[in-house]
Image: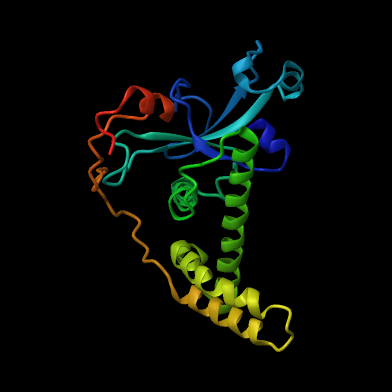
Amino acid sequence: MALLLQRGIFSVMRLHQRRKSDFRKGKRLGHDDRLIQWTRPKQWKPAMGITKEELEQLPETLSVRVVRITEIPRGFRAKPMVIATTLLDPLEVPVDEIRSLYRDRWTAELNLRSLKTSLGMDVLRGQTPDVVRKEIAMHLLAYNFIRLLMWQAAAEHGRDLHRLSFTGALHRLRIAWPILALLSGRGDGHAEALLSVLLEFIGDDHVPDRPDSLEPRRRKRRPKNYSLLQKPRDVYRRNGDPDAR
């Protein structure tokens, strides 16, 4: 949190389970809202993720605001949570905005789902670390390109960016991309017209806002009743595999 603050970035994150929070200490900013001081660790450990020199350059104390969340919606964690943030002004950033901002972290989970499921990055086929890094880079490039199209569609047609469908934008881009590549560079305006229609379709494909929807964490599709591939294929071919076809 201190390193982020040095870069001008404020953070909102859940308090680590090993760090105890006592709301009787510190400065009271409101109900379940306290301003406390954290002290820089005296002993450096490799698990910190920074060098000993970087630790010594951190400030000796850090002002942190802790907010407790007791009203847990149905389907969320059943116990209260404590949120730590470097947004310290209770007038500029009230407690309700801190709670809403932390809840928006679910958007990051949805973005990861778009990367892994919609773009197919859950299974990488590279055989070397260099090829795997290239696969990840290409997936991120395609993801950012689609997000850029969605941002442009939301700006031109007055839509809420968070309500646009990533999967819908991906499907429409797959259909229009070959035609756009064929028409680009001709200078007759057909590519620009097609791009305008594509952005309009992307802007019209929005998903409903369901903040408290509850879905069972269960798999619908049954896995195949085969054992895992734990050895190279040649080993099974030489020794025989009873399940082979």
Q: Residue at x 49, y 54 (%)?
A: 119
Residue at far top of view: 43
Name the residue nearer the viewer: 132 or 189: 132
Q: Quadrant of residue 237?
A: top left
The reply to whether residue 92 is in sight is no
The reply to whether residue 40 is in sight is yes
Picture layout, residue 63 above or below residue 177: above
So how many labels did they put on this image?
Answer: 0
Name the residue nearer the viewer: 234 or 60: 234
**187 horizontally vs 150: left or right:** right
Q: Residue at x 51, y 49 (%)?
A: 94
Q: Quadrant of residue 55?
A: top right
Q: Residue at x 31, y 26 (%)?
A: 240
Q: Position of residue 131 (x, y in %)?
A: 62, 40
**Colour scheme employed for the rendering of this structure:** rainbow
Q: Position of residue 60 (x, y in %)?
A: 70, 21
Q: Position of residue 97 (x, y in %)?
A: 49, 51
Q: Quadrant of residue 196?
A: bottom right
Residue at far bottom of view: 188
Q: Position of residue 129 (x, y in %)?
A: 62, 33
Q: Residue at x 73, y 83 (%)?
A: 186
Picture layout, residue 55 above or below residue 197: above
Name the residue nearer the viewer: 127 or 159: 127
Which quadrant of the figure contains the C terminus?
A: top left
Residue at far front of view: 238
Which quadrant of the figure contains the N terminus?
A: top right
